[in-house]
Image (cartoon, grey):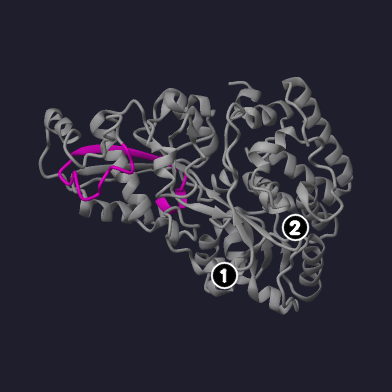
Amino acid sequence: MNKKKVLALVTATVMAASAMGCGASSDTAETPADNTESTDNTEAAKDTQETGSGESEATGELSYTTLSLDDNKDLTASIKFLHHKTDREEDGTIAAMIAEFNKDFPNITVTTEAVTDYAEDSLLRLSTGDWGDIMFIPAVDKTDLASYFMPLDSLDNLSKELNFVDQWEFGGNCYGIPYMANAQGLLYNKKVFADAGITELPKTPDEFVADLQLIKDKTDAIPLYTNYAAGWTMGAWDAYVGTVSNGDNTYQNQKLVHTAEPFSDPGDGTGAYNVYKILYDACANGLIEDDYTTTDWEGCKGMMNRGEIGTMVLGSWAYAQMQEAGDTPENVGYMPFPITVGGKQYVNAGGDYNYGINVNSSDENKLASLIFVKWMVEKSNWCFNEGGYTVVKGGQNPDMYAAFDGCEVLSDQPALAGEETFLNDMNAESELSINAGGNDKVQRIVEAGATGSESFDDIMSDWNKKWQDAQEELGIEVKY
């Protein structure tokens, strides 16, 4: 697979950041159901034809919204779930959820495998077909969705019951459902802020950088922990390029590809320019760790909990992990990203990794997989426990989002019809990979800021040139 083919992949706003929010194990775990009696294929197939099987009356296909979790209690199947949550595999969280699932569906055996370098390895597994029945959908091209995954329901039907289901929609069908959702802000330690004399959360880049200086001057904490060495953590900065930085939830997937010089300074503290400039200024002013090349992803969780770190830029998925990493979870906070647009702060909320079901699985395994997915979404409470923004419409959100009161919460709108692949193509051609794993470009900002090797404006000019060249090469019209 060549470089541009790998880059030309569809990714959700917070996928790059969430993809590796986990431990460092890739062991396979199995949680067998308490199967008491096997059912032959004829009888299992018969179950899928009965009322409540989850089949849509209109299409005869399995459907999330018509499936009832009160039915199919006797279904016998063995399914495999491939995922990236190595931390939750190791601490027993996933095994405990499957044990609860088996109380309702005792004859469905669920085997799980956690993959460490999921973003890359999952694509390789997908291409070989060696992955099982359920997986978190990796960065595939939307035009290839039907080749790998079965449609779970129509967008019209699914969007009435769940949030953020358009991430893996194509041709009116949804091929994925988020296991949780993220709201994009940043982590901070409340005690560190108090010790530094910070009484109000910053709302602009200038206020934030000034607060980082206060943390450096008045505490022993690292003001901003970059997580440079992990690599994937750098992609978190891309999540603020659209809605958060300009208040426009059509920008990321509809306007960015048509925008001339999207990395130029608008002059009012907003836009992509000022998102990345926060990082550059923090590095240039010595407001990060002493040696950014030696950051430690696992170690930083306890450091944040203990007050050895003031702030970290990561999606809300990381909040629960920071709380669990020490004895002072009450000091871990989550705040809106410090950019204000026209007097208002905006929060972008969207789906994390999505469950996808193998289109080539047997009918029995497809039904069992859809049952498991629906149970996980609606019954497991995984989203809430991870600090996720609710996927189920009307669901409860954790208290961690209290700081978002007064902000406007928006979700990125999907690409326009006929332009579904434009952003993928632009990301690949420019090799900037905005919100698609473009970690190297953000690491470049850290290196340049810390060493003075490049000015920030020179980097932004280079990105603008790459973007313009890609537009010309692909024949994409510049409208804005």
Q: Are marks 1 and 2 in contact (CB under 8 Å)?
A: no
- Disc 2 on helix, strand or loop? loop
Residue bearing the label numbered 2: 341
Q: Residue at x 73, y 33 (%)?
A: 258
Residue segment shown in magenta: 63-89
* Mark closer to the chain start, 1 or 2: 2
Q: Say which of marks 1 and 2 sits in front.
A: 2
Q: Residue at x 67, y 66 (%)?
A: 309
Left or right: 371 with respect to 272? Answer: left
Left or right, 307 with respect to 90, comes to: right
Locate residue 125 relative to residue 346 in the image: left or right.
left
Amino acid on which the number 2 mark rests in the picture: Val
Residue 374 horizontal/vertical position (percent): 33, 47
Rendered location of residue 45, percent (x, y): 17, 30
Position of residue 27 measured from the top left corner of the image (x, y, whole percent): 41, 43
Residue identified by numbered label 1? 402
For image coordinates 70% across by 47% down, the residue present is 241
Residue 459 lies, with reference to residue 40, above or below; the image says below
Tell me the residue at 77%/33% (across/down).
Answer: 479
Q: Is residue 209 above or below residue 2?
A: below
- Rendered position, 182 above or below 323: above
Q: Kindly identify the amino acid type of the residue bearing the numbered disc 1.
A: Ala
